[in-house]
Image (tube, rainbow, N blue to C red):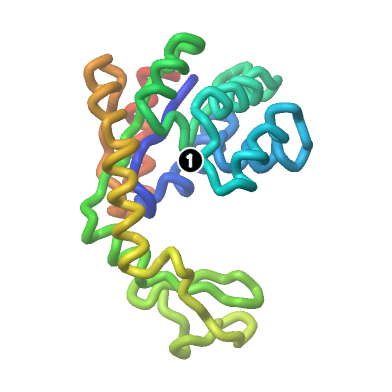
Amino acid sequence: MKIILLGPPGVGKGTQARLISSKYGIPHISTGDILRKAIADETELGLEAKEYINKGQLVPDELVISIVMERLKEKDCEKGFLLDGFPRTIKQAEALSGLIQIDKVINITASDETIIEKLVGRRFCKDCGATYHVHDVPPKEEGVCDECHCDLFQREDDKVDVIKSRLEVYKKETAPLIEYYKEKGMLATVTGLVGVDKVFAEIAKILESVA
């Protein structure tokens, strides 16, 4: 089972990716994770990517594709995989389609307003890393962690202006992939942020035809 997961930042892709990986026994492959690992392991491709990152430049498509393909050749991908964060562009998608047959592309959607409300309300403990939400999962005492009683904070990328900017970048760079895979008859769309279990049940139903 070879799957691509699409969706805007904050829509819950990470949570659903972990559930899919666990249920179907396939690795969850995040582009960010494999780039960081390639750099940490000082592979030839990783060192090349590091040069671009150190200069504040985007890693070129060709190099990202090479690093992803290197990861997909590993033994744990023999029964399939779940790609999260790749492809990001039509160019990457076209290159991938020439190398591997993808079974299904799942697009998780939510309105900008819903995503902003979810992300703006997130709070994190500076000490133990516990997570809260000012409306959904509030701490017993405002601004204080229930577990270790340390201060909670809001991440910079959870500020409204930053979230809006990230959503615009997604629409410009990645959203065209939705049409690309729709035209190929590979796309299935699921509404996100309506409850983790409900979203996963919809995804599992879609993947029944693939498994």
- Count residues near mark 1 (Cα–Cα under 10 Å), then give few for <14, some for 14-19, many for 20+: many
Q: From this view, report whether residue 15 is shown above or below residue 107.
A: below
Q: Quadrant of residue 6?
A: top left
The structure residue drawn at horizontal position 75% and vertical position 42%, both measured from the top left corner, is 40
The structure residue drawn at horizontal position 29% and vertical position 22%, both measured from the top left corner, is 181
State how many labels appear: 1
Q: Which residue is mark 1?
A: 17
Q: Is residue 120 left or right of residue 178?
A: right
Q: Residue furthest top?
A: 98
Q: Is residue 62 left or right of residue 109?
A: right
Q: Considering the numbered disc 1 on the image, is that residue within a helix, a strand or a loop? A: helix
Q: Position of residue 183 (x, y in %)?
A: 22, 17
Q: Nearer the viewer, residue 43 or 58?
A: 58
Q: Position of residue 106 (x, y in %)?
A: 35, 31
Q: Quadrant of the C terminus?
A: top left
Q: Position of residue 58 (x, y in %)?
A: 51, 40
Q: From this view, report whether residue 211 is shown above or below residue 151.
A: above
The disc labelled 1 sits on which kind of residue? Ala
Q: Residue furthest front?
A: 55
Q: From this view, report whether residue 68 is shown above or below residue 119.
A: above
Q: Residue furthest bottom?
A: 141
The structure residue drawn at horizontal position 38% and vertical position 26%, both measured from the top left corner, is 207
Q: Nearer the viewer, residue 18 or 124?
A: 124
Q: Position of residue 198 (x, y in %)?
A: 32, 47
The structure residue drawn at horizontal position 35% and vertical position 50%, both measured from the top left corner, is 11
